[in-house]
Amino acid sequence: MFCKAVILRNGQGNIMNIKTVFNFTAILSLLCLLQVASAAAQTYQVIIYEPTAGFSDTEGFGLRGQQRVGAGRIAGSTSPEHTHAFLWTGTSTAPIALHPSNFTYSAAFDTDGTRQVGYVENNLFPQVMRRAALWSGSANSLIVLSNKFSEAAAIGGDQQVGYVDDTFTCSECGPTGGQFAALWRGTAQSLVNLHPPLFGCRTSQAADTDGVQQVGNCFFQIPQMTSNYRALLWSGTAQSAVVLHPANYFNSFALSVKNGVQVGFGNTGTFPNLNPSDALLWRGTAQSVVVLGRGTALGTNGTTHVGEVDGGNNRSNAFRWDGVSGAGFNLHTLLPAGVYENSTAEEIDTEGNIFGTAQFPNGRTRAVQWRVTNTAARQTLYDFDGDGKSDVSVYRNGEWFMQKSRDGFSAVAFGASSDKIAPADYDGDGKTDVAVFREGAWYVLRSLDNAFSAVSFGSPEDKPLPADYDGDGRADYAVFRPSNGTWYLLRSALGFTGTAFGQNGDIPVPGDYDGDGKTDICVF
């Protein structure tokens, strides 16, 4: 059926990007097709994180929601591991220092959008010790997860994972134990030893968790064994360990997991010539392995994967793989030409934003973000658990009933029977927030911190139309007032604006019709 649509497009800024442009006829039946096509068209803004006073370098490791984490190298230091843990929030490139004053070095490796994990280190002899660390946004929120040599590599759900090593108790002590994969739930007392009961497995470590599964590897020491390191998958206990190691590889490593998908890499050579490496993807078993191509896969959001590939001349290039076909995009080409010699993409969030590191020819580094600017076109409606899939949900007399595709069933009492529902991702964490519009007031239950907020914006006759109108990754408060055909927007990044566009009787159908990452005003 052919229909007439009127579209008011917003402007586009100067950004380094890859973009596919779609020209389409204003046909209502094409709206769903447009959403699918624009999901494949990613427009990136490249953001370089410069070091602040006292630091010479920055490194990017993890991101989620409105947070990015990494480290800053201390100016004049002799080692790249002489760093302090950094946290960046919102759109700011100025870091928040997570480093506690009573430690010498630290680094942050991952965030869930609220908390951060990594390590703190004290190098005062004889107590040379690195310890797994958990923060909640500030240096004084530090929780030390182990009093032994350890690191926390990742956080997901209520879980933190990494390793504990009994071998390193002081600089001159002999071995007293060994390294084992570790899982915590917020405290040192919650430690779960994930070291698998597998013959020949000497040491193990966990690299990532999505709150359900954990991935990592084990070092095997068996005479005549054809491989040393083998990729592992756990489901919360040592006994649940599954060996993901595929045949014909010398070593394999599982480094990231999301929604039943695991990625990592395998060495195809033989010792001591272990290169080249293949980027690998699994779905729970060794037999399910898919070779994405030459390279190293470091992160996944379940559908898209990132890491690095050979850039020629012994250089590495940050890379994005799409699905399981091996096709993707060289992210290094979006960096300023001729400035950086190497780059790597460490992590990708549910919205497709990517965080990693770029390296100058002299070895100095900068944290870099490839920020998706067409997030409005890519956000999944009614995705209450952030897995990229719409969830079956019902609103009934002030109660929300949600059958989440990843997290299962949940219900919450929030609202009144006469309210207009207004669910959207207001906090930018990749999950739809429960929200209602009542007589000109907005009530939101944020998924990021489970906190309640109320905003007075609009009048009782208005139609609530929350969406990301300024392209910052967060839904904005917006209404269409039929009596005067005017749109009123309270944008999270750009503030208030009002636009007369439409007339009484029109049906408002906002959407990102030009693929620039900002929702456009539109009526039918």
Image (tube, helix red, strand yellow):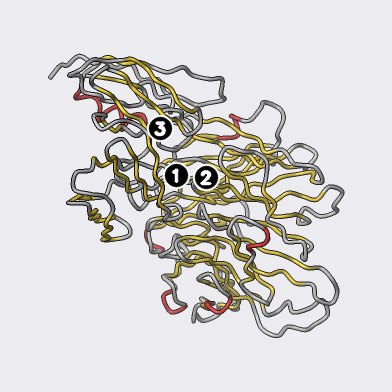
Which quadrant of the figure contains the C terminus?
top left
Using the numbered discs, state the Cα–Cα distance from disc 3 to disc 2 in whole angstroms: 15 Å
Q: In the image, which disc is placed on residue 53?
A: none
Which sits earlier in the primary sequence, circle 1 or circle 2?
Answer: 2
Which quadrant of the figure contains the N terminus?
top left
Label 2 amino acid? Gln
Q: Which residue is mark 3?
A: 468
Labels 1 and 2 touching (C-beta < 8 A): yes
Element on which disc 1 rests: loop
Label 1 amino acid? Asp
Q: Residue 336: x, y in percent?
A: 66, 27
Q: Residue 369: x, y in percent?
A: 59, 38
Element on which disc 2 rests: loop
Rendering quarter of residue 311: top right
Q: Which residue is mark 2?
A: 66
Closer to the camera: disc 1 or disc 2? 1
Which sits earlier in the primary sequence, circle 3 or circle 2?
Answer: 2
Label 3 amino acid? Asp
Q: Nearer the viewer, residue 296 or 269?
A: 296
Q: Residue furthest left?
A: 1
Q: Which residue is mark 1?
A: 427
Using the numbered discs, state the Cα–Cα distance from disc 1 to disc 3 in whole angstroms: 11 Å
